[in-house]
């Protein structure tokens, strides 16, 4: 039996875990860095994927001194690089089946 634990964190809990003020998390949601469940900020729920993305966003913002809009672009580009690398590796493995040594 395979069970997956899914977190459902409130805005306040995420603020504590990523060590950022709620205003910053609201901005990150506005720029599409994460998309929490729920309507109003008091009802927002963040899962473990969103938590990881928030941590990465805060780290980028602090280390590179980027605004949230630039962080959103940087994260999208990093995600795309990851997807392309995975696709490249998959194609490389498939190609190796046809290459004779």
Image: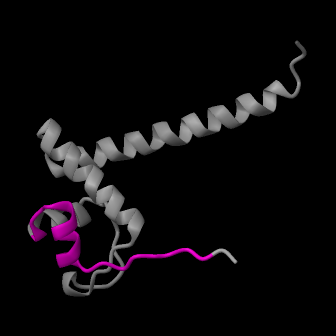
**Residue appearing at x 22%, y 61% in the figure:** 28
**Residue appearing at x 33%, y 74% in the figure:** 46
**Residue appearing at x 60%, y 77% in the figure:** 3
Estimate the x, y position of residue 40 in percent, counting from the top left.
23, 85
Query: How many numbered discs, if any?
Result: 0
- Quick one: 54 or 2, which is closer to the camera? 2
Give the left or right position of residue 101, taking residue 90 as reference.
Answer: right
The C terminus - image quarter: top right
- Decide: is 57 above or below 51: above
Estimate the x, y position of residue 37 in percent, counting from the top left.
36, 79
* Segment colored magenta: 3-22
Based on the picture, tell me whether residue 70 belongs to the magenta stretch: no
- Quick one: 100 or 76, which is closer to the camera? 100
- Can you see residue 66? no
Rendering colour mode: one colour
**Residue appearing at x 41%, y 63% in the figure:** 49
Based on the picture, tell me whether residue 10 belongs to the magenta stretch: yes
């Amino acid at each position: 039996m395979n069970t997956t634990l899914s977190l459902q964190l409130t805005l306040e809990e995420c603020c504590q875990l990523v060590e950022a003020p709620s205003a910053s998390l609201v901005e990150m949601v506005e720029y599409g860095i994460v998309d929490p469940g729920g309507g109003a900020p008091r009802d927002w729920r963040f899962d473990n994927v969103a938590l990881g993305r928030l941590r990465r966003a805060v780290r980028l913002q602090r280390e590179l001194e980027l605004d949230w809009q630039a962080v959103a672009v940087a994260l999208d580009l990093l995600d795309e690089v990851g997807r392309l690398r995975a696709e490249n590796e998959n194609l490389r493995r498939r190609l190796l089946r046809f290459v004779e040594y």
